[in-house]
Image: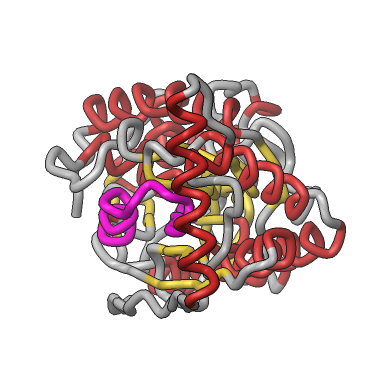
Amino acid sequence: MPDRTSTDMTTTIFSPTRRRAGALLLTAATLTAALGFAPAWAQGAGDYPNRPITLVIPFPPGGSADTAGRLVAKGLSEKLGQPVVVDNRAGAGTVVGAGVVAKAPADGYTLLLSSGSTFTVNPAIRPNLPYDPVKSFDPIGIVGRIALILLANKDVPVNNVKEFVAAVKAAPQKYSYASFGAGTTSHFTAEIILQAIGAQLMHVPYKGSAPAMTDLMGGQVPFSVDTVTAAIPQVKAGKVKAIAVTTATRSSQLPDVPTFAEAGYKEVNADTWILLVAPKGAPPAVMDKLEKALTAVSIDPAFKKSMLDQGVEPSPINRAAAISQIERELPLMRDIARRANIQAD
């Protein structure tokens, strides 16, 4: 997909009354600091937010992550009482948008909503990122997860994991698999599968999910790894076969499709997740307010239904658990990249 870069459309309205109030607050903050303590508003968080917030989404408009981001933006706006303006900054596998937010002021008015690729996949294969996955951001929370799935062309004589393993081990030169790009989540997930079953297949990278799916349906490639979101219409129409999902439990959207774990490959446990972060160093009171607002959005029944409609499993995870997710997954992805010689496209 072509990159689309848009500018920050937020505006701040100043008034004489607000300026005078700000001067009084500054004076009070100075006095209280001199007495050895400072209230929350003296740390720049007391009236947060008092102007629009920019939510950077490092994908083009229209995809699952972008749609999920817009749902989050709408929910945060309602909970925080200020507009949350979506700014699509697509490019370089989320690197462009993440780099913009990493350099933004740490005041809670510029946020990033992105997939796990930003925080664990890109750092595993790109040595010169304009951000550090840990040092540049403060996670606010994970809002959803998207399962991946192994698919087969409908004419390939493989219908389950056991038959897949037997086929590719018997004739590895006969088969290949498609991903939606070199160094993407689908590429990494396919290599997790192959390492688990002890096989090697030729990788055929595509420029996105749509062309990979088209060639899978047309028989140009026998297998592919894609998101459940992309697979659902084609699986339900009988145009491709669903072999297994790559998560520990079955997808609620394709409940009849088994997991690799059910076939004995418990080490195959991979998905992509959607995380909201702020630039590193935002005031603790701001981070607390954002986390509480995101939690309220995530548990709202209407929000959860809308996410499911987009193929995203609602999965609210707090700041501490999100940090643990990155710390746990980052070395795993680096190891997979090293063993499979995965490089950025």
- Taking 3 as reference, is 20 above or below it? above
Q: Is residue 102 magenta?
A: yes
Magenta residue check for 279: no
- Return the x and y of residue 301 as percentages of the image width and height: 87, 58
The span shown in magenta is 96-114
Residue 233's x, y, as percent? Answer: 66, 71
Q: Is residue 58 left or right of residue 71?
A: left
Q: Is residue 168 visible?
A: yes
Q: Quadrant of the N terminus?
A: bottom left
Left or right, 295 with reference to 161: right
Nearer the observer, 270 or 54? 54
Residue 171 in view of the camera: no
For image coordinates 48% across by 78% down, the residue present is: 13
From this view, report whether residue 174 is shown above or below residue 284: below
Residue at 27% over, 37% down = 132
Compared across the picture, whether 80 is left or right of 132 comes to right
As drawn, which residue projects farthest toward the right? 301
Residue 78 located left or right of residue 225: right
